[in-house]
Image: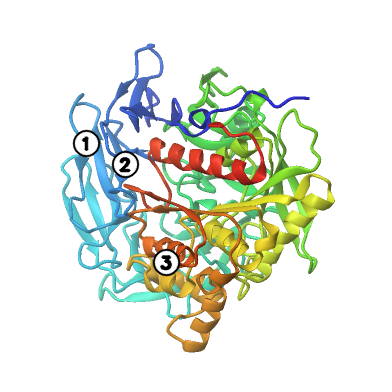
Amino acid sequence: MALPKLHTIEDLFDSPRRTSASISPDGTRMAFLAPWKNRLNIWVQELEDGSEPRAVTADETRSVQSFEWADDPRWLLYLQDDGGDQRWHLYRVDLDSPGSEAVDLTPFPGATVMGFGPSPVRPGKVTLLLDTRAAGMFDSHELDIATGELSLLAESPGPGKIWVQAGDGAMFLSELTAEGDVEFSRRDPATGEPHRVLEWRGADYPVGSPWQITPDGTGMWIVSNRGTDRTRVVRADLTTGEETEVDSHPVFDVDARMMVNPAVPEPLIRDHRGELLGVRYLGERQVVHALDPHFAEVLANLEKLSEGDLSHVSFDRDGRRWVVSFEHDRDPGATWFYDHATGESRLLFRPFPHLDPETLAPMRPVTITARDGLELPSYLTLPVGVEPANLPLVLLVHGGPWSRDSWGYFPPAQLMANRGYAVLQVNFRGSTGFGKAHTQAAIGEFAGKMHDDLIDGVDWAVAQGYADPDRVAIVGGSYGGYAALVGAAFTPDRFAAAVDVVGISDLANFMRTQPAFVRPGLINNWYRYIGDPEIPEQEEDMLARSPITRIDQVRTPLMVVQGANDPLVVKAESDNIVESLRSRGVEVEYMVVEGEGHGFVNPENQMAVFEAADRFIAQYLGGRSGRS
């Protein structure tokens, strides 16, 4: 057997040729993202007449990451920040004015749009949350798309409190209490005072839970685990508060990854009126439940198009014409057109047509049992064309930690497998999507049992014969970067190399430096799982779990990567540990990426980071490198 062709960094990390396609509400054209001057921009193409696509945005600085059609297909809307600072502005594209520049509809210095969506009351308008008065105070506004006129609907009473509008025009207040619980109240139209109608326990949802008000404004669909370990969909009456189960899966959670990754499709699939069509569940693979007879017919035909999992779904107002993409470990993002009236289907594009699926490595679900008996759903990717025995191993640790690894195409895993490494991704305790008991088992376990789970994963791979225990690297970003630092500082003898990308070195400093707009949301995750740095005994414990206090133990070769503009894990987190180690004479490879924040968007930056990591890991694990 022999390894397949050596994929270049550009093969795996350069921008897709096309991606994120969405059909217009009238079904006549599609929009998608594609490169223009080495940045992803929005393009539009007619679906029927074979005309050439045209770029309708021209951002030369930062790639556009997502967009939405307005209800009037003249307009496209998208969010953009500045160099990764996560202060999002809402932009409008006018398709009736070719060549015109995108218009910033929220041109307020320092302000952030937290979210937007079509007005439930009036066509031609969107509602959005915007903090023009004070950072973290997100007032509810209505925006006229055509004119740009912004009207205040309701002022936020304080951080963590937002107003939302229902289809009957009623206003509801969503409030995160000091205890971390979520209260939902209806505004009295006469007095303006809110009256509580619902409450749910925030501790069961460390990063929140998806919910949507029903189109008629009488109820709310909630992804709930009240009284259960697994999440399901319930409908709550917005007058009585009574909850009724709508749908559930016997062993899978609702797929709520979009709470931390906006690129992931929403779990509640709804039509243009907002009615519920289906629900996504996620175990080892995805399962979609259809709740609407028409959607059930469509879904059965869509699932015949690909062996992958249904990903992004868009359709016209009549539910006739569909543009959908599929997640797949070796054929990512294949995008199809389907006409339900005629049965016609055709492949529109593959985002990475240069990648031969046969040269990519399959991702296999495996279950690992931790030392205390907890089952850890995981994924193993083995190199193609190599005997899977005694291989160097790369342990890839996901961020969050309130997130999860899932089946599909993951460029870092493909890179490492292509270089001859076995790749293991462990959904350690604290990961979400496997029941609340699995998540809550991480309380108080940073650098404790959470790290033990990763070590148990390595031991499993060694015991199975896949991995050489002397050639193991730990690599991760965000929480995964913290885990890599913990590996280097707490268990240095287990790792031959560590790569930390935007990772936390000092848990207390990390919490003290969080921006105002995220602070209200920390109560059910960082404060609950780690502690409060303003309480001395808790700060002491946090420091004991921080790599910065154990630099004298570090002897694992270490690479640190930091976004210069990161507002969440500030640059000081990386500066401090690098300077501390260098002052002891420990060599650290340090890479600061200008113009990026917490996660790298522009392709040249992604490629530079992974080219450096590729070379660094090969140096210590002995694999082949694309630049060797």
Residue 576 bears which disc, if any?
3
Mark 1 vs mark 3: in front: 3
Quarter-wise, where is residue 433 in the image? bottom right
Q: Position of residue 18 (x, y in %)?
A: 44, 26
Q: Is residue 547 left or right of residue 252?
A: left
The residue located at (34%, 38%) in the rendering is 64
Mark number displayed over residue 113: none
Q: What is the spatial separation of the Cα atoms under label 1 and label 3, in whole angstroms?
A: 40 Å
Question: Which of the two discs, 1 and 2, labels the residue nearer the N terminus?
Answer: 2
SS label for mark 2: strand
Disc 3 versus disc 2: nearer the observer: 3
Kindly identify which numbered label has been placed on residue 78.
2
444 and 321: which is toward the camera: 444
Which residue in the structure is indicated by mark 1?
Answer: 102
Name the quarter where the C terminus is drawn: top right
Q: Is residue 50 left or right of residue 131?
A: right
